Image (tube, rainbow, N blue to C red):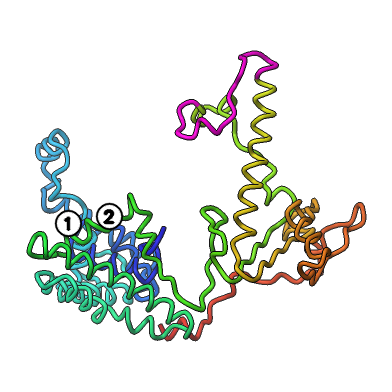
Amino acid sequence: SGLLSLPEVADLVATCEVLQDPGANASLVRLLSGPRWRIGPRDLALLGRRARLLVARDRGEDDPERRLAAAVEGTDPAEVISLADALDTFLESSLDGSDDGLPFSPQARVRFARLAAELRDLRRSLADPLMDVLHRVLAVTGLEVELSASPQALAARRRETLHNFLDVAASFAATATAEEGRATLLAFLGFLRTAQQYEKGLDNALPGGENTVKVLTAHKSKGLEWDVVVVPGLVTGTFPDGKGQERWTAHGKVLPHALRGDAGTLPDVGEWDAAGLKAFHADMKDHHATEELRLGYVTFTRPRSLLLGSGHWWGPTQKTRRGPSAFLRALHDHCAAGYGETEVWADEPEPGEENPALAEDAVEQAWPLPLDREALRRR
């Protein structure tokens, strides 16, 4: 999650990982299967086969004694299968496939050779300062051009995201230079892995951005945080949640309350008999209902000026009707008292009425919207 999970940043980081580590196979697959190189599963599998052949040739697997010794000794880090090494072989191999006999597609051979040449050129600059390396990667790979080719609003958001990432890199470079004398790409990638593991992928570095729509959960809400807040899905069983929390007395995967840091706020089992467990179950239901009310309170006090709520009777595929939840009914009553407006309030369906979305003549709307093929071709 966070900044590192956004596509424009993830592609840049993947390129840097491939440059620094020939064994970064997952990152290389991301690049090869992405919109720029568009390598299919068949050619990716063949590339993996070529990489395995390289390792087998280097360690002489035709010799039974060597195979036995390798099995006893374990894996040498130098013998790990590297897709990047296999990619480099396309710089010397013929494009017609006469050298290896593997049935790569002609387009894949050309693209493999182009990417290998690009990566080899970029590796020559790894000794440069960190920010110079990152800007060179952006220029050579065309990531900046791809951002500019995006629709205007999307391009602005992606540029802002990329600038936030470069700000993080610049801050790291300044700190590392002050402490150690120099910031390297290797050290920066280590910093990013730590951030991915312990800081939710640089969650705090996500772009704020004015005039943008934020998709957020109701958790960690703050009062009067946004001018306008939209809360969809206020239907029975969804918000407030009607399922309740799993009880540790019934599910082995749930941590007992006594071992939790918030044990003082949680119900406890008074007596270990049928009556005590029944009382505990009732207390858990009450506790869950209170937690849902608290979550609803922080959600509905989040906007500074406008709160929009919505619900529905029918979901897209449900045969059982849902209807407004207690929260949506409370908002409706609040508006009816003169403190807001109700634009639409659908009448309750008749008993036995079926979901109109499941009717044979219902028109199915594609979502997400299909990609613009012409725009995709230009990329």
Please give the label number shown on residue 374: none
Specify whether 86 is left or right of 225. Answer: left
Which image quarter holds the N terminus? Answer: bottom left
Specify whether 167 is left or right of 177. Answer: right
Residue 122 position, x and y percent, is 17, 74
Residue at image mark 2: 193
Look at the picture and state if 323 lies above or below 106. Answer: above
Q: CA distance from mark 1 to mark 2?
A: 29 Å
Residue 291 position, x and y percent, is 62, 43
Residue at coordinates 28% horizontally, 66% vertically from top-left? 13
Tell me if residue 100 can be seen: no
Specify whether 136 is left or right of 278. Answer: left
Residue at image mark 1: 54
Residue 80 position, x and y percent, is 19, 50
Magenta stretch: give its range: 258-276
Choose between 83 and 157: the one closer to the eye. 157
Residue 265 painted magenta: yes
Residue at coordinates 48% horizontally, 84% vertically from top-left? 151
Q: Which badge, 1 or 2, is on the more N-terminal residue? A: 1
Residue 155 painted magenta: no
Residue at coordinates 54% horizontally, 72% vertically from top-left? 213
Query: SS at mark 1?
Result: helix
Amino acid type, callout 2: Arg
